[in-house]
Image (cartoon, grey):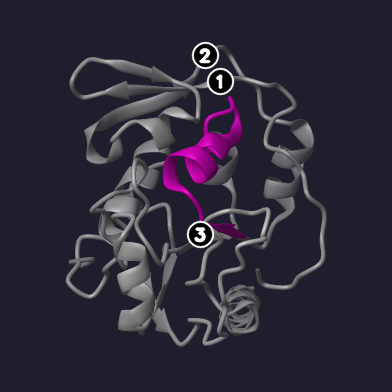
């Protein structure tokens, strides 16, 4: 997305199954449950079906990082799953790196239906800790009404942030011009179904992240 180069390191080398415990007391097993059932706000907690240990290489990368970026992505099946392996939460919390959350652009049926960005933040904090994030980056503009209408057919909405109250958090909110204006047409022959037509502009988002990183490095230099 941000057109950077680096190493892809899995959070764990194990192969567990994701289990969702519902507020109703029911249990759903496997990531497919988030496609087949209306989970959203009724999720109480998610965990793996067995003990899973974090990949030592991933822990090492976190310990050496200047910044840690979480998001965007499917909340329960992409973001939180990477926080569940034993040792991952502690590594992120104890890291001196600045932590940046990139808010999702759209809600997702059976994952974050009817969520706003504050809901997304609170869920992630549940698996890390409150006030873990230093910055929250969001798009200052909403997508076009035409694109939103297409997503509304599947029950998806723009993940609102302007009406959210972040005064009880220590983070800095960064509304930025990072929404892609590239016209992406649906191709019936595309093997990837439901490809996102609403997305961030990788170059613009990278500029914001670089700015925050440089600002963080300057502050570290001043404090020396």
Magenta stretch encompasses residue 215: no
Residue drawn at the location 57% of the way across and 85% of the way down? 182
Question: Which residue position holds label 3?
Answer: 72
Binning the other alpha carbons within 10 Å of mark 3 as few (below 14), some (14 to 19) or many (20 upward) gives some
Residue 182 placement, left or right of 44: right
The image quarter containing residue 219 is: bottom right
* Pointer 1 residue: 17
**Residue 1 visible in image:** yes
Name the residue at 53% across, 35% down: 81
Q: CA distance from mark 2 to mark 3?
A: 25 Å
The answer to whether any part of residue 142 appears in the image is no
User: Helix or strand or loop: what does disc 3 sit on?
Assistant: loop
Instruction: Quarter of the image for the C terminus: give it.
Output: bottom right
User: Cβ–Cβ below 8 Å for labels 1 and 2?
Assistant: yes
Whole-angstrom CA distance, mark 1 to mark 3, is 22 Å
Q: Which residues are magenta?
A: 68-89
Question: Residue at (42%, 62%) from the top-left corner?
Answer: 104
């Amino acid at each position: 997305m941000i057109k950077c180069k680096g190493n892809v390191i899995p959070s764990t080398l194990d192969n567990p199954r994701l289990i969702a415990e519902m507020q109703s007391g029911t249990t759903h097993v496997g990531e497919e449950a988030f496609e087949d059932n209306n989970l959203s706000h009724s999720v109480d907690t998610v965990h793996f079906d067995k003990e899973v240990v974090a990949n030592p290489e991933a822990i090492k990368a976190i310990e050496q990082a200047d910044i840690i970026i979480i998001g965007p992505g499917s909340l329960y099946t992409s973001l939180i799953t990477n926080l569940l392996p034993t040792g991952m939460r502690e590594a992120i919390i104890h890291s001196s790196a600045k932590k940046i959350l990139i808010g999702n652009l759209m809600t997702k049926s059976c994952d974050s239906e009817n969520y706003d960005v504050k809901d997304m933040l609170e869920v992630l904090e549940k698996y890390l800790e409150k006030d873990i994030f230093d910055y929250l980056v969001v798009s200052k503009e909403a997508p076009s009404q035409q694109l939103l209408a297409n997503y509304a057919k599947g029950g998806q909405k723009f993940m609102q942030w302007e009406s959210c109250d972040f005064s009880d958090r220590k983070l800095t909110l960064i509304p930025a011009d990072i929404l892609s204006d590239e016209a992406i047409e649906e191709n019936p022959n595309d093997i990837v179904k439901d490809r996102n037509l609403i997305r961030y502009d990788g170059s613009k988002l990278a500029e914001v992240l670089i700015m925050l990183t440089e600002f963080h490095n300057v502050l570290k230099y001043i404090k020396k």
